[in-house]
Amino acid sequence: MGSVSNPAIINSTRQGSFDAKWASVYSILDFPKYFPELVKRYGKLFEIFDILRAAGQIGTCQSETITQFEQGSPERYVTLHSATGTVAAGTPFTMEIEEWNTVANGGTSAVSVGDKLAIPAEYCTISSVKCTLPEWVQVTAIANTTANPNEPDTNITVKPLNQLTTIAVTVPAGTRLMVTGGNYAAGSGGAQPKTNGYYSRTFRTSILKEAIAIEGSQQSSERYLEHLQGGGVGILSEATIQGEFRLDRSINYEMLMGGVVDNLTMNNRYNVANSARGTLGMLPQLNANGCLQYFDTKYTVSDLNNIKKAFISQGVVETSAKLFAGNDFLQGLEDNALDYIKEYSGGSNLLDNLGNLGAKFRTITKGGTTISLHELASLSNPNTLANYGMSDFAMIIPDSQVTVRDTMEGSDMKVDNLRLLYKNYNGEDRTRIMTPIPGVNGLTGAPNFAVDSYDDASWQLLTEFMLAFYKVNQCIFARPSSVL
């Protein structure tokens, strides 16, 4: 007769209560608990990239380079290269002006015979009485100096238009003198002709890339993440979000601090070396061609007065502007504005209708110009630009529009002087490309073919864009004097 062999009976029964010791032994039964929402440690901050998108300042370009031509100012001053010395009343004298006034004009002086210059009042007297207004002197002769052939400064002989005008105090080197048309007698010869110069600036595109990759079997694994509010659908959602975020950040920093690349090449598929492309960012353009404003320690309400002065010097007639700055810059301005308000109002308008203390500054009107304040978080980010002291930097851009030509339509249009242009023409849109490179993988949405035999899939992200910054000379770059 056969026999039966039974496994040993496992008996886990014991004397006692369902206590902590029991719970630790059978912790496998504990139901996992988690907060139902995905909490992001690092939020999406508002950047210049977001500002331009929100303002609709997005366009297209049809080439990797676009050249803008600019006409120079019809008015210019001359700068004294050496001091004048004192001059007796009504006596002609010679002044040497800086070489940039001549070399910049192709070797021709910025002034002509017949022009007149204004000598500052503090250096002049009339009948031994100190002048209160500038005094005019008129150019009677011009000659290049030979003292230094490498710096051909120009000697101009001038004569006071008032015979009682005396140069009682030496006019120092470096003094800027206004130039305008002179006075003529009836029947006299004509004035000298002049030309106005032109400049050009070339905007270039930048190519930026990102990538994401997922190994096989990762998307099909269920995770707590996708059950959380904001957790997305599988690991593909998380990878895509992170890749898009990194590309956005790269665009933002390129727009702020990018530079033209002339020292980096990369080989293409056929082993041909091509130069990497970069667009010149806002800060480098302002540093090279904008109005520079320096301040001591913290920016104050009084410093706002210099904005109007800078705008006037560049022919800006708009009465409003946008100020983009880091947190330290804005905090210093806010603190100073509070002191300013308390000094003139006793602080009464810092209280709202409920008696709560409030201090929120969105716009400030000073010197006839209304400034709207905007924080650029990237300048204050301790992980990036704040490490370089840029939380105290600011860019001030007037609310002016420029006329640009739409080369596709052949028409002119008005746009703000700061635009983001994506390369897009003739069927190739390089605004934001996200292309899969599939392996042998069953991801939904991936192409039904493979480029190799590996069990994974990747995506390449690419964008090509250009920062067009028109009339940069009319904008202001403000920063502490400590950076000098």
Image: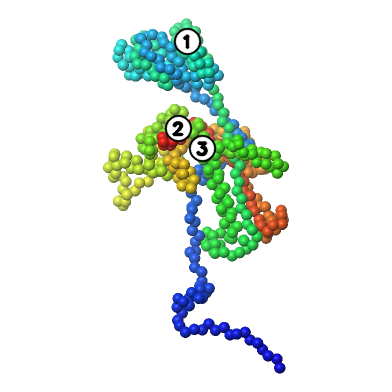
Neighbour class for label 3 at 10 Å: few (<14), some, many (≥20)?
many
Which circle marks residue 141 in the picture? 1
Q: Residues within 10 Å of mark 1 (few under 14, many from 20)?
A: some
Quote the CA–CA distance across marks 3 and 2: 13 Å
On the question of residue 57 being in view, the answer is no
Q: Of the residues under marks 3 and 2, which one precedes in the sequence?
A: 3
- In this rendering, would 31 be left or right of 66? left
Q: Evaluate if marks 3 and 2 touch, with contact meaning CB atoms under 8 Å apart.
A: no
Question: Where is residue 424 shown, x and y percent of the image?
Answer: 63, 41
Kindly give the residue lying farthest to the top in the view shown.
Answer: 187
Labels in figure, total: 3
Q: Is residue 90 above or below residue 283?
A: above
In the image, what residue occupies the spot 67% across and 60% down? 442
- Give how far apart the Cα atoms at labels 1 and 3 are: 44 Å
Q: Residue furthest left?
A: 346
Q: Residue at x 38, y 14 (%)?
A: 85
For marks 1 and 3 on the same chain, the one whose residue lies earlier in the sequence: 1
Look at label 2 and name its amino acid: Leu
Residue 407 in sight from this viewpoint: yes
Tag 2 residue: 292
Classify the position of the C terminus by image quarter: top left
| 142, 407: nearer the viewer | 142
Residue 79, percent across and down?
Answer: 45, 20
Tag 1–tag 3 contact (CB < 8 Å): no
* C-alpha distance separating marks 1 and 2: 36 Å
Residue neighbourhood size for the residue with mark 2, other residues' Cα within 10 Å, grouped as few (<14), some (14–19), many (≥20): some
Residue 420 occupies quadrant: top right
Disc 2 is placed on an element classified as strand
Q: Which residue is mark 3?
A: 282
Which amino acid lies under the numbered mark 1 shown in the image of this protein?
Ala
